[in-house]
Amino acid sequence: NQKLFSAYESFFQDFLNSGWYVLGKEVSNFERQFAQYCGTKQCVGVASGLDALILAMDACGFDKGAEIIVPSNTYIATILAIVRCGHIPVLVEPDIQTYNIDSTKIENAITRKTKAILVVHLYGKSCDMDPIINIAMKYGLRIIEDAAQAHGATYKGKKVGAFGVGCFSFYPTKNLGALGDAGAISSSDPSFMERVILLRNYGSAIKYHNDLIGYNSRLDEVQAGFLSIKLGFLDEINNHKRTLAKLYLEYLDDKYIKPAVHKDYFDVYHIFNIRCSRRDQLKSFLLENKVQSEIHYPIPPHYQKSMRGILNGRFPISEQIHSTTLSLPISFFHTKDDIMLVIEIMNGWQR
């Protein structure tokens, strides 16, 4: 989008001449704007989506070895954050319809060591939050939201990132993407956010005075400026992707399993994924026809080499999703004609 790039170029010249490159007005402006967008009192910018998860979990102050419930089909970053904080990931299978954590299975996984439910709003769809909130209240658990793929997604009219502690990635491929790594934490709990602000900057509120064992995880001024510009386009981006998704949903052959749609959920389609039993053959066929597709994600977390001895057991629903899912083209730069061509090619594939 030329409007977006022209605004980036203009901002960058001003930024370069400003001489202020770390934790300045651009970060403060974006934090204020994004908190308002999410419907939370505060937002704190950090260096990446993974850092957002790590700092949020650290700020919760759980004793080491706490159990954190997390979906078994999430991206590895969600689980890395739990392990990095010295806690134990407890996998719960997703709902095969939505690919998000199955709220009916959470309670069975709770023990006296459980301290939080880490929900993941996968592919741009909110989790089923009402029952999750009820479970969290019943057992006194924190809700941490991995909203890395769901900027602007809503559940019953409320934006993700406002149900608990919201953790966002602004990796360039996201609907709200920076031009490099960037992340943020959202919350309406001022004392919690005060701790996050210290943690991101060496545990320091006053220079050379370190109150906490902190990190160096600050959102860059330049990325904050880019994000403020793109935030003004986010609803347009989301609506464009929803328009493209509607074409897939309406015209793509039912031999493919398409994403579930429900009136309570406003999906933003960071990824438009379908499922197909002959996924790898379909991917090759699309490539032969000059259509690029991706797999999010090919290997379940419990099969990752790094997770040996940490994640145990079999998770058949997760395995089924990982072995059949395929992500189709859907971006702000794709046109309706592009998508209709993909649909035509896919509908012509002989299973």
Image (cartoon, helix red, strand yellow):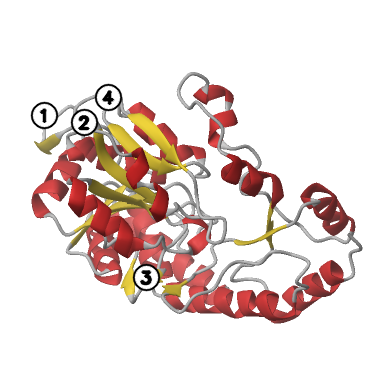
What mark, if any, has residue 155 been given in the picture? 3
- Tell me what residue is drawn at x 35 percent, y 75 percent: 156
Q: Nearer the viewer, residue 258 or 189?
A: 258
Cα distance, mark 2 to mark 1? 8 Å
Pair 1/3: label in front:
3
**Disc 1 + disc 4, Cβ < 8 Å:** no
Q: Is label 2 in a helix, a strand or a loop?
A: loop
Q: Where is residue 262 drawn, in percent x and y?
A: 49, 75
Instruction: Name which residue type carries label 1.
Output: Asn
Q: Earlier in the sequence, mark 4 or mark 3?
A: 4
Q: Is residue 113 above or below residue 119?
A: above
Residue found at the far top of this picture = 309
What residue is pinned by disc 2?
A: 214
Pair 3/2: label in front:
3
Quarter of the figure with residue 293: bottom right
Cα distance, mark 1 to mark 4? 25 Å
**Disc 2 + disc 1, Cβ < 8 Å:** yes
Q: Earlier in the sequence, mark 1 or mark 3?
A: 3
Q: Is label 3 in a helix, a strand or a loop?
A: strand
Pair 1/4: label in front:
4
Q: Where is residue 294 drawn, in percent x and y?
A: 69, 52
**Which of the image's four quarters has the N terminus?**
bottom right
What mark, if any, has residue 210 been given in the picture? 1
- Tell me what residue is drawn at x 76 percent, y 57 percent: 292
